[in-house]
Image: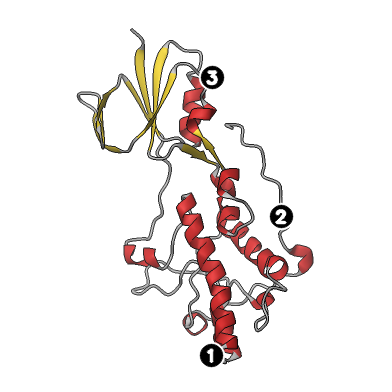
Amino acid sequence: MLRRVVIVGGGFGGLSAVRALRNTPVRVTLIDKRNYHLFRPMLYQVATGLLSADEVSGPLRSIFRRQKNVDVLLDEVTGINSDQRIVHLTRGDLAYEFLILATGIQNNYFGHDEWRRFAPGLESLDDADVIRSKILRAFERAEEMASVEQAGTEEIRCQLTFALVGAGAVGVEMAGTLAEISRMDLAHDFRHIDPTSARVPTGLIRHDLPEPVCFYLQPAPSLTQQLPLPTVQYQPEFSVRRRQLPPNPHL
């Protein structure tokens, strides 16, 4: 009887663990609530419309079709009984001898979960769809304000202000890609606004403020009054160019 190894999570950690057990005398069960592996380093390009969802994801069953000692299970873990060595799923229980948890990360709103509806994170393809919709709707709303409502320059400028919280790899890439789509992809698509006037303020955002003062990709009309932040000026020679998807070693 082969020993059973249960791996929770089909991200980089889970896939690496399954690969490492390829030639071992064990039976591996990979559990994930999605049936695909997501290449998250390029998720920001889905959020800005430069890549499609299928370009950054691959079916788990296809990835492991040649690895005979692995089963892929589409389900969600609701609990773990470590004493009895049982994983509780939404549709039953699964016994294990060895358990590997590779469930990934989650967004931290520093105790202000009410900010979530204003500031969507970037963890999944669904999040990318939401953010892409917010970006495009901001330009469409600015066009409507200019052509129908005869809004002033400052109102339109606020509508085209995007606040990014976090200056890690994703935040920096998002800022550069926003500059790219506003100055290249959308530059000539509107009649009443100048998409190149879109801006990304920069500065130190405190997370211990009593009220949410900044929103992730949410146009904030009072942003310039609440946070007098400088504007990042993107010159064409420094703008991020469309890039090829780097190879994913797991696909």
The amino acid type, in three-letter code, at marker 3 is: Arg
Labels in figure, total: 3
User: For the view shown, which residue lies furthest in the right direction?
Assistant: 237
**Callout 1: few (<14), some (14-19), or many (20+) C-alpha neighbours within 10 Å?**
few
Amino acid type shown at disc 2:
Arg
Residue 74, quarter of the rendered image: top left
**Residue 130 coordinates in the image, percent (x, y):** 47, 61
Q: Amino acid at mark 1?
A: Glu
Q: Which residue is mark 2?
A: 242
Which residue is drawn at the image coordinates 57% and 84% (left, top)? Answer: 156
User: Can residue 168 be seen?
Assistant: no
> For the residue labelled by badge 2, is the local secondary structure a helix, a strand or a loop?
loop
Image location (x, y in percent) of residue 65: 52, 23
- Relative horizontal placement of residue 180, taking residue 208 as reference (left or right): right
Disc on the earlier residue, 1 or 2: 1
**Disc 3 designates what residue?**
66
Q: In the rendered view, does 193 fall on the left or right side of 12?
A: right
* Contact between labelled residues 2 and 1, with CB atoms less than 8 Å apart: no
The answer to whether residue 109 is above or below residue 96 is below
Identify the residue shown where x is 66% and y is 69%.
182
